[in-house]
Amino acid sequence: MQPWPQNYDPLGNVFLSTLVAALPIVVMLGAIAWLEIKIHLAALLGLGVALAVALFAFHMPVDAALATAGYGAAYGLFPIGWIILNLIFLYQLTVDKGLFAVLRGSLAHLAPDPRVQLVLIAFSFGAFFEGAAGFGTPVAVTAAILMQLGFKPLQAAGLSLIANTAPVAYGALGTPIIALAGVTGLDVHTLSAMVGRQLPFFSLLVPFWVVWAFAGWRGMMGVWPACLTAGVSFAVPQFLVSNFHGPWLVDIIAAIVSMLAVVVLLKFWKPSDGWKPESVPGLEFGVPSPAASAPEETTSPTQNTALVRRAWVPWILLSVLVFIWGVPQVKQQLDAFSAPKFEMPRLHNTTVRVFPVVPKPTSEKPTKPEEAVFKLNWLSATGTGILAAAILAGLYMGFSCSELLRVYRRTLWTVRFSLITIAGMLAVGYVTKYSGTDATLGLALAQTGSLYPFFGTLLGWLGVALTGSDTASNVLFGSLQKITAEQTGISPVLMCAANSSGGVMGKMVDAQSIVVASTATNWYGHEGSILRYVFFHSIALAALVGILVYLQAYVPPFTGMVVK
């Protein structure tokens, strides 16, 4: 069968072809942003439009188009959906046994000053849950804790959103980076390393920024040692793990180091500037509500300590097993037992990218058709390591096998729409990739010329702001960023990483995160106030990421930071 060549101007008019190519993204994002359609339905709507554009405008063969959608959906469910399902399973087990409340209460008593609580809980502890679960969990957790510590609803919601930025690219055990590697074909370790040379600057900045947003400049300066300690102790592990291990454990390790560093600091230093927050009727800062306290059976310091240690065991198990699963030698051994590969029928080697997206073919280097091979490495998959951690943790917590199965069924039902969303988003991304519509958009975006590094970064911000997911933004725009970078002579690794790094700053203004924050703080109907509270911070931080990427693209010594 002769491969089908992509056509990047099927309508004979570059402007019209670009408009049509943009329809799937415009329809899907518009449905989310303006029509307020539920995101899983918007993803399915976007997939329908993407297929229609591929078939009727770009004349992609019907069987190849349908196979592409199935291929993308399969990748969305495995390995990405497999990670999410098992992470939420572990989280639910800790909630059911009351150990999550213990974990929350232990953090609530560590620091009496609300500014330090903000750094420790919203930034460091929130980053841990971003790394372990992601998908709204850190905002829900930290906003609820801050409310129980005396923060006003707007402050608890808005500050949790601002703090949940720098860790997002490595959230849910590196899911955004894994998805980005899947749609771009770039090495996951290379992308992890490049993002790890962008976000540590902001990991250092965000603790100062979030305290400034809460307490002003003078209030921030009163706790600068805590901000600096949290930022440096997060940024350094973030750089090291992302560059020398991979994306899976970046947030978890960095968050643990950051929390421990702040706790150690508090043993030798306390704020002494006399700063006082506004009083909150019915609550005092630094005094947790009963909901944040440990269960009643913790009647002595010894019992309290033992219970806190018990509450940390599931997350320690998660860190250890995922780290082991991430070791390349371990993966190779597990793959030796079972890792079947399936060439997607009607799609594998049936489409081919053409000039100017790829170099003109020569007799020595003919154009290679696009591969479509699905690897079912179920044993070495990160999600399997998480499932093993969850089962071991469940047995440790006293669950029977039947109870574990019951919680797992409940978890599967809980995340059903998330799985549909992920599958739909990946299907859209793969259809745009194999039909060539992403190439059409990339060629148009390349016209921004030398300013492309800045605006390409903001494209990632826009994707997350409208979809609510750095993973979804990477799937939608990752391949486009790669193509545009190649057209403009900029490193594709730099710009694909910039899509994820810029995207994290859009996390605080996306509708889903704002709804999660308003729900966690019991502040229904005030989502507009939360959006106004965080909007400036989101735009300003995204612009700073864009400036950094621009410097990395053109200005020494920043250019030396780009991973080759």
Image: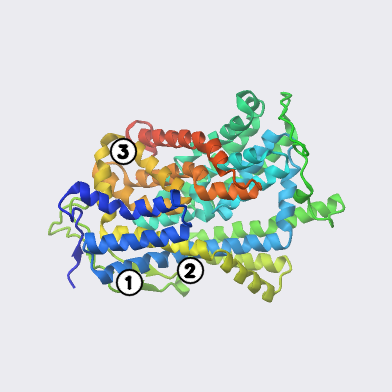
Local packing at callout 3 (Cα closer than 10 Å; few below 14, some 14-19, many 20+) is: many
In what element is the residue under mark 3?
helix
Quadrant where the C terminus sits is top left
Closest to the observer, 253 or 144? 144
Question: Residue under circle 2?
Answer: 333
The amino acid beneath tag 3 is: Tyr
Image spot of residue 222 (x, y percent) = 67, 26
Question: Residue under circle 1?
Answer: 344
Quadrant where the N terminus sits is bottom left
- Marks 3 and 2 sit apart, C-alpha to C-alpha, by 43 Å
3 or 2: mark nearer the eye: 3
Image spot of residue 395 (x, y percent) = 70, 69
- Marks 1 and 2 sit apart, C-alpha to C-alpha, by 25 Å
Which of the two labelled residues, at mark 1 and mark 2, occupies the earlier sequence position? 2
* Colour scheme employed for the rendering of this structure: rainbow
Q: Residue at x 33, y 55 (%)?
A: 24
Q: Is residue 187 visible?
A: no
Q: Residue at x 62, y 32 (%)?
A: 214
Question: Residue under circle 3?
Answer: 452
Q: Is residue 485 visible?
A: yes
Q: Residue at x 44, y 49 (%)?
A: 33
The amino acid beneath tag 1 is: Met
Image spot of residue 285 (x, y percent) = 74, 36
Residue 187: mark: none
1 or 2: mark nearer the eye: 1
- Asked if residue 127 lies left or right of residue 306, the reply is left
Closest to the observer, 326 or 553? 553
